[in-house]
Amino acid sequence: MPCPPSGRRPGRPNLVDGERTAAVNVRLPVSQFDKACGRATRERVTLPELLRRGLARVLDDDDADR
């Protein structure tokens, strides 16, 4: 991975090369949060990764419907 420009603290890499990321906050009922955490644990991924995958699947399905 190349060094970041001087004066910029190194951090996590972008999720998609060459594309900035956007911060998103989501409110869920506790029951959905608990189910999502359980599934993320079973799939051995983080909760944010599980949510990104789910959103990508919905968006891909939406593109297929058009």
Image: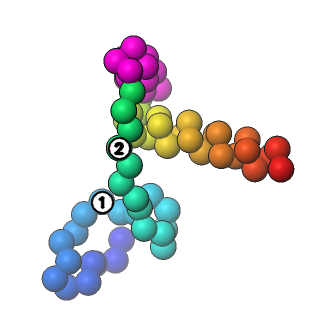
Q: Which residue is denoted by mark 1 in the rendering? A: 12
Looking at the image, which is closer to me, 19 or 1?
A: 19
Residue 56 visible in this rendered orientation of the protein: yes
Instruction: Say few, some or many: other residues with alpha carbon within 10 Å of mark 1 (under 14 / 14 to 19 / 20 or more).
Output: few
Residue at the (35%, 63%) spot, across then down: 13
Q: Is residue 34 magenta?
A: yes
Predominant secondary structure, magenta span: helix
Residue interval drawn in magenta: 29-43
Residue under the point 65% across and 39% down: 58
Above or below, 5 relative to 60:
below
Q: What type is the residue that disc 1 sits on?
A: Arg
Residue ID for mark 2: 25
Based on the picture, tell me whether residue 39 belongs to the magenta stretch: yes
**Residue extending farthest bottom:** 6
Quadrant in which the N terminus appears: bottom left
Q: Quadrant of residue 27?
A: top left
Identify the amino acid type marked 2: Asn
